[in-house]
Image: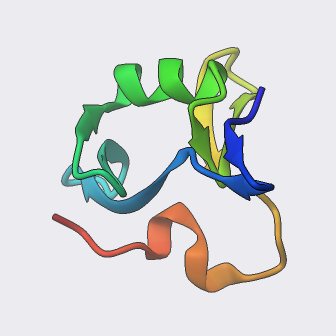
């Protein structure tokens, strides 16, 4: 499900991240300025409310958020600014 106006995707995107001491992503800031903890962001991604990212099941069986594969490493979640 994607929200669009005139073919334009109007869903939020992730623009900044927070990381813990191990470098793991722990929170996300969206284009509207909302700050989402990992669990909330995962729910929003799975519901299709955030564009540019997807949820995948890791080898450990847990579900994680990752950026869509678009060939541009500069917009990977790990490369986004921190807040």
- Nearer to me, 44 or 18: 44
Query: Residue at image x 67%, y 81%?
Result: 73
Q: Is residue 65 left or right of residue 73?
A: left
Give how far across and how far down residue 4 sits, in percent: 70, 44
Residue 75 placement, left or right of 83 = right
Pick whichever, 81 or 63, lies toward us. 81
Q: Which quarter of the figure is the N terminus placed in?
A: top right
Residue 80 vs residue 49, the one in the foreground: 49
Up/down of 73 relative to 54, above or below: below
Residue located at (37% from left, 49% from top): 24
Give x and y (percent) for residue 39: 38, 20
Q: Residue at x 19, y 54 (%)?
A: 21
In this picture, is 32 found above or below 62? below
Q: How is the image coloured?
A: rainbow
Location of residue 56 (image quadrant): top right
Quarter of the picture containing the C terminus is: bottom left
């Amino acid at each position: 499900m994607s929200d669009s106006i005139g073919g334009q995707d109007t869903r939020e995107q992730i623009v900044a991240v927070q990381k813990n001491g191990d470098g793991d992503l722990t929170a996300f800031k969206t284009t509207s300025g909302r700050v989402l903890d990992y669990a909330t962001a995962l729910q929003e991604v799975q519901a299709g409310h955030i564009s540019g990212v997807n949820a995948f099941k890791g080898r450990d069986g847990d579900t994680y958020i990752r950026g869509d594969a678009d060939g541009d490493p500069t917009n990977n979640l790990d490369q986004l600014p921190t807040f």
